[in-house]
Amino acid sequence: MPEFHVEGMSCAQCVNAVTIAIHALDPAAGVDVDLGTQRVRVRSDLDRFVLQQALADAGYDPRPVGLESSDHL
């Protein structure tokens, strides 16, 4: 399950924006947002790079959690 650290998320509007960005690509995706840790976990069959780009397109700077820096976009 892809997980991203998304710095700058601080409110319900951020949660909504992130969720909408993912659901625009995969309406059935599960999106779990933790504002305290600024992490987003996504349950989807989409590639993590596609998910990361969707978050970036929504105006955020998503960083994959648990990957080597060479794996980042």
Image (spheres, rainbow, N blue to C red):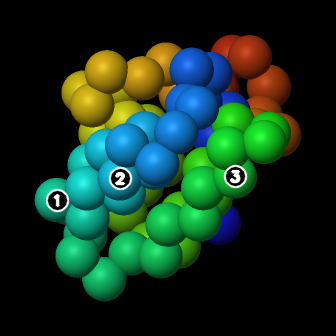
Give the residue pinned by disc 3: 34
Identified at 23% across, 76% down, the residue is: 27
Residue 73 in view here: no
Q: Amino acid at mark 1?
A: Ala
Give the spatial CA distance, label 2 vs label 3. 12 Å
Looking at this view, is 60 or 47 the one in front?
60
- Name the residue carrying label 1: 24
Q: Is residue 6 left or right of residue 67?
A: left
The picture places residue 43, in percent across and down from the top left corner, at 53, 73
Q: Nearer the viewer, mark 3 or mark 1?
A: 3
Q: Secondary structure at mark 3?
A: strand
Nearer-N-terminus badge (1/2) = 2
Q: Nearer the viewer, residue 4 or 34?
A: 34
* Up-down relation of residue 2 to residue 18 (above or below): below
Residue 35 lies left or right of residue 62; in this view the side is right
Image-based side of 7 in relation to 22, left or right: right
Indicate the position of residue 62 as horizontal and vertical percent values: 53, 28
Q: What residue is pinned by disc 2?
A: 16
Three-letter residue code for mark 3: Asp
Front tag of 1 and 2: 2
Secondary structure under tag 2 reads: helix
Q: Residue furthest left?
A: 24
